[in-house]
Image (spheres, helix red, strand yellow):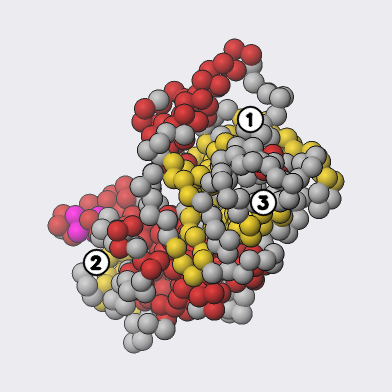
Amino acid sequence: MWAAITKYLLRTKVHQDYLHTLLQAQKGESIHQKYFSLSRRPWQHSAGIAQAVQTFNTSAPIQKVEALDENQFVCVHWEDGSQSLYPSVWLRDNCQCPDCFLHSAKARKLLIEKLDVNIEAKDVTLTEQKKVHIIWPDNHTSEFEAEWLKKRCFSEQARAKIQEELFLSECQYWGSDLQLPTMNFEEVLHCDESAYRWLVTLKKVGIVLLTGAAVRQGELLKLGQRIGFLRLTFYGPTWQVQDKTDANNVAYTTEKLSFHTDYPVLQHPPGIQFLHCIKQTPTGGESEVVDGFHVANKLKEQNPQAFQILTSTLVDFTDTGTDYCDFSMQAKQRILDLDGKGQVVRINFNNATRDTIFDIPAEKVKPFYAALKDFVNLLNSVENKYTYKMKPGEIVVFDNWRLLHGRQSYKARTEISRHLEGAYADWDVVMSRLRILQKNVLKGM
C-alpha cells in the first residue's frame, strides 16, 4: 500500500516533506499506559479505574479530505496535524447507510459478492457537519463520522490501541512473588465496578481470590449468572472435588496432583476455572499455581529446541467414563499453542489424560519426553510456583489457558475432609461481560 502511495506522491511532485509527514503519521503515537502494576494492587482500591482501559483520542475534528492514488485511497487530515489513510474498497464495504448496514443488529448487510474490490471514490468531500461524504461510481453515497473513522485508523499504533481495548491482551507475569489479588465475593456480585476490576485483574494477572462466599454448594452458579453462564462439560455444570471411591478422575482422590491444565481432551478447553472451598482438610491439601506463559517464555529463552518441540508436536489426550453422562473423548493438542506472532496463547497439558497412543515417529518420542521434562522442571521450580491453602468460603478463579494448577496430597479419613466445588466458563463469555462492564463503568465516571 505504501509503495503505491509513494509512487503517486512522487509522480505528482508533492513536496517530500509532505510525504515524510504522511508516512510518519501512520506510525502513530506510543501505546497507552499499562493498566496497572502489581505494586498498586488495583483490586483493593477503586482509584485508577479510569486508567484500566484507556481509549485513544477520537475527538479530533477533520480539517480536510482528499482522494489519493487514482482514488484508491481517501486521506483524512485531522486538525491535530495527523493524517489517516483509508482504502476505498474498505470504505465501500463499511458504508453505514441503511441499505448496507443493519443498525438494529449492528451488522453488515452488503454482500461481498456485490463488492467491487477495485472500486474508486468518484467524489470525496467534507460536509458542513464535518462528515466525510463519498460518491461512488454507481452514484451510491456514503457518509462517515469523524469519530468513527478515527477509531478505525489503519496506522500501526492506532490498530494496536484498539486491539488492546477490545482484547486486553497485556499480561502481568509473576512467579513465587505473586501477591494474590483478593476481592469480596458479594461486592463482585452486586457492584459493577467491583465486577469490572475482578475481570480486568483476571485477564491481566490470570488469577483472583474471592472471599466471603457462603460455605455451601451453589455459590458458583451465582458467578455464572454474573458473567452470563457457565460451561457445561461431561462432569456437569458444576462438580464436586472430594475423595471418592472408584474415582473417575484423579482429582477425586487424596493424592498429589501435578501441575496441569483442565480438559485438554476437549478441542476447545474451558478458558476459566472456578474452585470454591466448602471444607478444608487440617493438614495437607495446599493448592499450587504457576504462570504457564511466564514459564514458557523462560523455556523459549533457555532451551529453544524444547520450546520448538512442544509448540509443534501434536499430543494425544483421552478421557473415558461416566458422570453427567457417559463419555469417550479424544483430542490432539500441542502442549504450547502459539498465535501468529509466536506468542504462547494457550497451554494444553494434563499428564493424567495424556494418551498411551502417541501419533509421532518412534525416533521423535525421546526428544519429546526430554522437552516435556524440561518444561515440567521449570514449572516446579521454587522461583516459579506459588503455594496457598484455601479456606472455607473462598473461591479462586483463574485462567485455565495460562495457569497450571496442582494440589499437595492429604490423608484420607473415614469422612470427607476436603470438599471443593468446581465449574468452568469460556473466555468468550467472560470477555463479553468485561466489555459491557467496561462501557458501563467508564461511562458513569
Circle 3 residues within 10 Å: few <14, some 14–19, many ≥20: some
User: What secondary structure is found at the residue carrying circle 1?
Assistant: strand
**N-terminal label among 1 and 2:** 2
C-alpha span from label 3 to label 2: 65 Å
Per the image, the residue denoted by label 2 is 82
User: For the point 59% across and 12% down, which residue is it?
Assistant: 363
Q: Amino acid at mark 2?
A: Ser
Q: Amino acid at mark 3?
A: Ser
**N-terminal label among 1 and 3:** 1
The majority secondary structure of the magenta stretch comes to helix
Q: Which corner quadrant holds the C terminus?
A: bottom left
Count of marks, rendered view: 3
30 vs 252: above or below: below
What numbered label is drawn on residue 417?
3
In the image, 113 versus 368, the foreground residue is 368
Res 135 quadrant in image: bottom left
